[in-house]
Amino acid sequence: MKEIEVIHIKEDVELNNPVLIVGLPGVGHVGKLVAEHLVEELEAEKLLEIYSHHFPPQVLVDENSEIQLVNNEMFVCHTEKHDIIALIGDHQSSSTEGHYKLCTVYLDLAMEFGIKRIYTLGGFPTGQLTYSDEVLGAVNNIDLIDELKEYGVNFKENEPGGGIVGASGLLLGLSRFKNIDAACLMGLTSGYLVDPKSAQSLLKVICRIFDIDIDVGPLEERAKEMEKIVARLKEVEQQQKGMPEMSTVKDEDLRYIG
Amino acid sequence: MKEIEVIHIKEDVELNNPVLIVGLPGVGHVGKLVAEHLVEELEAEKLLEIYSHHFPPQVLVDENSEIQLVNNEMFVCHTEKHDIIALIGDHQSSSTEGHYKLCTVYLDLAMEFGIKRIYTLGGFPTGQLTYSDEVLGAVNNIDLIDELKEYGVNFKENEPGGGIVGASGLLLGLSRFKNIDAACLMGLTSGYLVDPKSAQSLLKVICRIFDIDIDVGPLEERAKEMEKIVARLKEVEQQQKGMPEMSTVKDEDLRYIG
Amino acid sequence: MKEIEVIHIKEDVELNNPVLIVGLPGVGHVGKLVAEHLVEELEAEKLLEIYSHHFPPQVLVDENSEIQLVNNEMFVCHTEKHDIIALIGDHQSSSTEGHYKLCTVYLDLAMEFGIKRIYTLGGFPTGQLTYSDEVLGAVNNIDLIDELKEYGVNFKENEPGGGIVGASGLLLGLSRFKNIDAACLMGLTSGYLVDPKSAQSLLKVICRIFDIDIDVGPLEERAKEMEKIVARLKEVEQQQKGMPEMSTVKDEDLRYIG
Amino acid sequence: MKEIEVIHIKEDVELNNPVLIVGLPGVGHVGKLVAEHLVEELEAEKLLEIYSHHFPPQVLVDENSEIQLVNNEMFVCHTEKHDIIALIGDHQSSSTEGHYKLCTVYLDLAMEFGIKRIYTLGGFPTGQLTYSDEVLGAVNNIDLIDELKEYGVNFKENEPGGGIVGASGLLLGLSRFKNIDAACLMGLTSGYLVDPKSAQSLLKVICRIFDIDIDVGPLEERAKEMEKIVARLKEVEQQQKGMPEMSTVKDEDLRYIG
């Protein structure tokens, strides 16, 4: 396998006013929830799969005990005004360099599809458990702000204060060099749990932007399933910490003997 | 030395219905125990050695005080129905990228040997000390399930919930792209100790699959030795943590002075 | 994006006795404070921007909610005696190799500009909260010492005892191979806070070296803003630690399941 | 600067029965102490310097406030029977891959010098503060054992139990592929302190091997100085941990915001 491998599932797609929406794992999994919900509810078609050395060396096991190598995928959802390309996936890059390399590939693909606008979706951690239906925005072109305000997006000076980390931020930064307008839309969330309420607020904004109507009900259910997976991963992680193994002498443990 | 170096010990081997079994270090060392036991009991011949920058920079010292650079090795065990290629070794990759690169090499070698089926062996951590003789399976092709159930392998929806990490999982994922059927067989184990009981259960399944008869007795002894090595590694690790050294200013300690 | 990408903003600059000043983030942000202050007060022009896979995958959000991909930048400040090229930025490299690669690029650029002297600015952590206006120096050519002493720089045997880590040190080391004289000037600082007082002391030395007159007043204000950003980053970091996420299975957590 | 850069100081050296001795930082700095002592006492000449992206991005400051980029160096010490090439240095590689790449370069250089035997020197951590003058050995060719026993080296089954990590081990492993005999000689040491007593024991063995006479007295003094540097590095490390900085958002802190 190459460092980053793109497997095209559907060739020669004709797209109508295509827009890219990115919903990868992140704070509260808000972006992932919304983008996967769109893919489900709009009966999207899979366009391609992306595999990479920069994802963890992991397969997931489905309900039939069949494995899937972790990946990112692009789907197309047809709506009246736009064809929405949705980038979703199991993981973001596990290394700094990988983030840059993967986002460069995402952007190259977007350009091949003729994308003129990118929305990256995410969560903004408040650290508080009280609920807010606010959706915060940041843009790579100041001209987008008035338009997005009309759809209910809030903008606050220098927020998020710590910047935007990962694909959601990096895609805004890199697409600027290509003169592609991009905005990051963040649902406010505690930061401690998979958050379907925040995803609902964000989804409503998306529906307004694309002038579509989507049932927000199933989001609760989807969030519960996602929470279960997160819990399992945490459990497994804990168990693994219990046992020192020959296979886990790590770089940082290597003080030189001899 | 190249990034990954394969040293062929025995050239031009003729193989009869070859199958690959992978038993590298992992949870409870269950897979490693079983595969090394097969190699010993079936008087396997060594085919090749694999060295790599992605293994720790470490040599092991044998009973004669002679060192061996850590590696992975492939052996061939001749049985009536199949020639079993066994991949065993001291370590798995110490980096994410290394996992992908090494597994790509393992798979290339398997294809050169004409392998049509892969079994990766491992442990499934339960977090509980109670014993279970269950062997859990996951496959990269749903068609394998009925066959494996007959040999006593259990399948459970979405298990392991955290997916399969490392070579055992990655080989299933990568071989799928090459249309090679592969299954991961996991003995249930606490996750805290080298587990010969779990290895016995897994070995019994392997014997049924290959229609061979192998003494499970020596597994106990083998596990005890392995446990000793694990304990030593742990001890050494603890000692090393006691002393800050010039040689161990690590990446993550580098805040910028000056 | 390439591994290191230099975007020239202003071409064909003619420079008068150019000198390079480096003020990247570090202990007490002393160097960063001073260099950014110079850029502001001397109404510097931006020459170029440097983007790299070795910076974090992060964008910062400005007061207009517009993002900026984290980078390093070179400005030119015209003064009577010298044109000062100032290298400032959001981050230093996040990897060991990246430090070497980035500093090699900085030095190549400096040589293209015809630089004959480099000053890297930083903080020297005392671990004590008492204030000192001392500026400590280290050089890559012993001939610089007498000159710098006249400007008020102190030199102490084997200080800093732990050496100089990051770009401030590495640029001294690498420029030596090119026969470019370079000195690291460090304001003494506690090491616990963004330190405008230490920056003032260092700025005074810089003013003497370049025979310029700069208002030190705004440094206090600038430091307060920087402290706020540091606080926010810390807060965000804390929040992020609260929640295990699918996206954060890290290399070091990967013990092999299966 | 290239990934690994070798700067030759002295060309066309003629060597008499050359042997390589390696004394890089490690447990108790025993190997480093002995090799640097040899270089001092035998008035060695410097042959070359090795710089690398795999060393920390750090310069050290000497007694004249002049910096030196961290490196590894080879010296030649002329003795009656052998010319001893001594490899000493400030650091070992800070990454797994770097260890393999650097040791490959060390070995290539050794082969250019016509080296037929390698001794890597190190410490073996006992975890106990009681003193022992034992020197433990491991070899890459069993034929070396009888010879080394005569010089007072002890050999114990499977010791060190955790193998030999870093350049001391890796050079034994790699040189075996080139049919170069190599032994690792380890002074027993607590593992908690720079240990001149252990270095004395190891030095005595070296003197017997090379039939030379060297004053062990200055070792105490040298160890004290080294201990001071270690202490300073520790102090600096502690101070740095006190302050979160913009420049230190690390890979592992990157959970995705937005």
Image (cartoon, coloured by chain):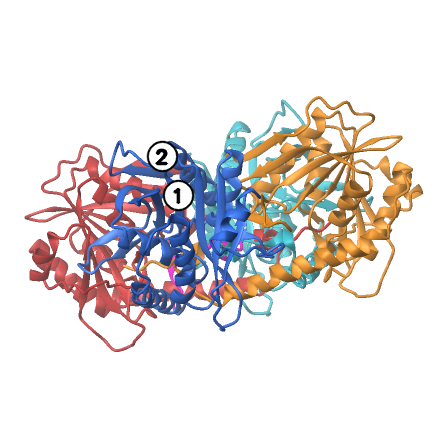
Chain colours: A orange, B blue, C cyan, D red
**At numbered mark 2, what does the secondary structure look like: helix, strand or loop?**
loop
**At numbered mark 1, what does the secondary structure look like: helix, strand or loop?**
strand
Disc assigned to residue B113 = 2
**Earlier-in-chain disc, 2 versus 1:** 1
Give the percent coordinates (x, y) of residue A92. 63, 46
Which chain is home to disc 2? Answer: B
The answer to whether A166 appears left or right of A211 in the picture is left
Q: CA distance from mark 2 to mark 1?
A: 9 Å
> Which residues make up the magenta segment?
B243-258
Disc assigned to residue C60 = none
Nearer to me, A117 or B144: B144
How crowded is the residue under tag 1: few (<14 C-alpha within 10 Å), some, or many (20+)?
many
> Residue at the spot x=57%, y=31% of the render?
C2
Callouts 2 and 1 close, C-beta under 8 Å: yes
> Residue at the spot x=31%, y=62% of the render?
D162
Image quadrant containing the C terminus of chain A: bottom left
Residue named by callout 1: B20
User: Against A194, is D198 above or below?
Assistant: below
Q: Main secondary structure of the magenta part?
A: loop
Asked whether B109 falls inside the magenta stretch, the response is no
How crowded is the residue under tag 2: few (<14 C-alpha within 10 Å), some, or many (20+)?
some
Nearer to me, A80 or B65: A80
Amino acid type of the residue tagged 1 in the rendering? Leu
